[in-house]
Amino acid sequence: MAKLAEDPPEVRAAAQAAVDAPRGVGSIASYWTEVPLPATGTWNAPGKGGAQADLVLAAPQDQVPLLFIQVDNCHETAEELADKLEKYGRFFRRKVKDTDGKERPMWRTRWNAPDTWSGDRPHPPVLLVFNRIGERNPNRTIEGLPHLRREDPDHRDRPDEPARARRGGAGVPSLRPRLHAAPAGSDRQSPS
C-alpha cells in the first residue's frame, strides 16, 4: 500500500478493498478460461463437435478438485444449452492414449483429479451459471433442460443421474461463503 501513497484516494481505496476482501477459491493459476474440450482432434487442434468451457477451476486445496463452468447470460434457449451439455458429454466420454500408452478419459490427460473424488460419476461436474443479463427467465430454461436430455445408452438407468435438473452443485462444496458481496448501492443481487 505504501507504493500507492501518491495515487488518488479512489485508487488507494480500491487497492485496500482488494487486500481486505475475503479469501476466494483457489489462486489465479487455478482458473482457465475459454477452454476447448475436443470431441475429435487434439488439444492443440480441436475438431468439430466439441464444447468450449467458459471456465475450468481446479482448486483441490479448497475442496474443488475439478469443476467445469458454463455461463449463460440468459440469451440462450434450453435447446441451445442442452446441445452444449451434450458436447460436454461427448468430450467426457472420449478416451485417448496417455503418454504411458494407457487409454483413459481425455480430460484426465490434462487435469489431475482423484479417481474417487466424485464417487461413481464418470466425469467431473459442470456448473451451469445463469447471469441475468438477457431477457430469458433462467427458471424456465432450467425446467426445459431435463426434457431435452438425449438418451445415452452408456448412462441409462444410472442411479447417480438426476431425473430432473437440480439447482446447486452436487458433490461440490458451497462456494457462497467465499463469494464477494455486492458493493453498497449496487442493484446486483447476491446469490441465494
Image (cartoon, rainbow, N blue to C red):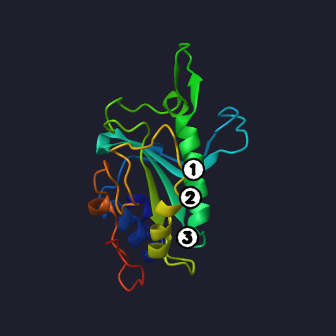
Characterize the local packing of mark 3: few (<14), some (14-19) or many (20 or more) Cα atoms within 10 angstroms: some
Answer yes or no: is residue 138 visible: yes
Q: Residues within 10 Å of mark 2 (few under 14, many from 20)?
A: many
**Is mark 2 in CB contact (under 8 Å) with mark 1?**
yes
Measured from the top left, where is residue 29 in percent x and y?
47, 43
Contact (CB < 8 A) between labels 3 and 2? no
Residue that numbered label 1 is attached to: 86
User: Which mark is drawn over residue 82?
Assistant: 2
Amino acid found under the numbered disc labelled 1: Glu
Say left or right for 24 vs 140: left
Spatial CA distance of label 2 from label 1 is: 6 Å
Which SS class for mark 3? loop
Is there a contact, CB below 8 Å, between mark 3 and mark 1? no
x then y, percent, for residue 89: 54, 44
Look at label 2 and name its amino acid.
Ala
Q: Is residue 8 visible?
A: no
